[in-house]
Amino acid sequence: MKKSIKLAINAFPSVPAKLQRHDDVTKPVTELSVDLADLYLHHFFDKWERIPPNPDPVHFDHVRYLMPTPDFRFQRNGLGASTTSRGNTSNELGHAFCRWFLAEKLDITYIAHLEHVRDHGTLTSRGGVSVQTDYTTKGDAPDYFCADGGGAVSLAEAKGTSRAVGFKSADFKKWRNQFKRVKVLDAAGKLLRVKGYIVATRWATEQNSPAVYTKLSAEDPETVGDREFRDEDGRVAVAVKAVHYGSTFLKLGQPLIAAALISGFLLPSDLEFQFAVWECLHPALASVRFVGGYFPTDTRAVQPYFDFGGKPVISPPNLLRLDVSGGTFFGVEEQTARSLIKAAKTDFINLAGLRPLDRWQGEVNGMSFLRDGHIIGPVDIFRPVAIISV
């Protein structure tokens, strides 16, 4: 399912390729189409660790409260019935839209919470670049450190609001100041300028006039510093990549791998970890294998497959009822998982060669396959093929 939102950008040196108008590449488009399954997967990573949301993760928490219109518009109380709940929902969705925009429109694939990158072992245990948060200045620091496929590093701040916010507003001025509260220093202690993004999403509801739309406003500021930051030894990008996949392994039931990736400590080289390997039955992903598992719709549900004469047989949760689904598959591309575990046993700098995958050319309702290798979808279109030890 797709919904449309409005777009405004500011202070970009040039219009990013995926935001360019077809008739004039010097101008940005004014509207974007959002695949809700992709948006959900970004939301799932930012909000949840090992425990899945309820109901079935494929059913995006907030989709139930959207209007049946082409644009992304909430019902009257779709953001929440109280000020606190509206604020929480707005903040959560703001982070999901920020991650979606960075990954899908700017090709910034790897996104990690700033404090985890700041304290990661690849930075704290070696000389070179360091990251500090300025606690002497009132306010928050940006939410994320990010890295693209080529290793370029940036910061990002996510916002969600029910108010109209323009680039000249007091809100944007306040958000720009957040980039002054993080300091990236070189080995000599010199302050470095880091590229950053502010991604603020304003929500529309059925109470608004038809002229008011959900709108994503993105700006391209940078931190203060004596010279431009270049991640010459690649360690900041490596830390971002490692942290980015930390919650992946929590969801896969491997908390030790998750802790190593998030904190930056090495695992014993002789320790092996077991995973189930699955394949997707959609032709567009026939050559891709995933390590993962599934979340049952009902914890009492039977496995979606059973062995019958050496063949996997799809087994519905209830042969008589048609309103019961088997559950949701979650996984990550097998070679990506192997690369992460190998780096966690040897040296995280080995993640410098980790690259985004090609975007698949298919579409299944409720299914998302991101360029970082993560996938989510109905378990009925996946099947287990092997058990591996890594």
Image (tube, rainbow, N blue to C red):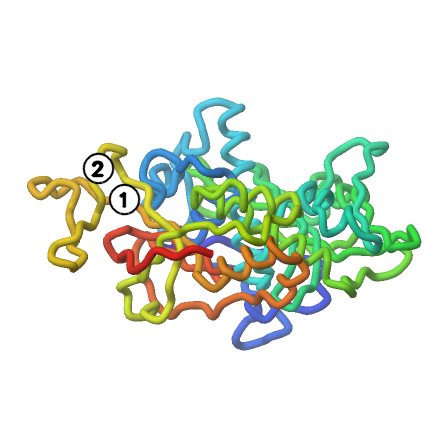
**Is 388 on the left or on the right of 122, as rendered?**
left
Name which residue type carries label 1: Gly
Residue 301: mark in rendering = 2
Residue 345 image offset from top left, x and y in percent: 60, 54
Residue 34, position as x, y percentages in the image: 44, 55
Q: Quadrant of the N terminus?
A: bottom left
Q: Are marks 2 and 1 in contact (CB under 8 Å)?
A: yes
282 or 40, nearer to the observer: 282
Can you tell which quarter of the image residue 332 is in?
A: bottom left
State whether residue 175 is above or below residue 152: above
Judging depth in this view, the residue of 314 and 36 nearest the camera is: 314
* Pointer 2 local density, CA inside 10 Å: few below 14, some 14–19, many at least 20: some
Residue 163 in view (yes/no): yes
Q: Is residue 3 visible?
A: no
Between the C-alphas of marks 2 and 1, the distance is: 9 Å
| Residue at the spot 15% in from the left edge and 48% down from the top edge | 315
**Residue displayed at 41% across by 30% down:** 77
Residue 363 x %, y %: 33, 63
Please tell me whether mark 2 sits on a helix, a strand or a loop: loop
- Circle nearer the viewer, 2 or 1: 2
Q: In the rendering, at what x and y percent does residue 197 appear?
A: 68, 53
Q: Quadrant of residue 106?
A: bottom right
Residue picked out by circle 1: 327
Q: Badge 1, how many Cα within 10 Å: few under 14, some, many 20+?
A: many
| Outermost left residue | 320
The numbered dot on residue 91 is none
Q: Is residue 322 above or below residue 194?
A: above
Left or right of residue 370: residue 173: right
SS assignment at label 1: strand
Please give the name of the residue rendered at 50% of the width and 60% of the height, measured from the top-left corner. Answer: 338
Q: Earlier in the sequence, mark 2 or mark 1?
A: 2
Amino acid on which disc 2 is placed: Ala
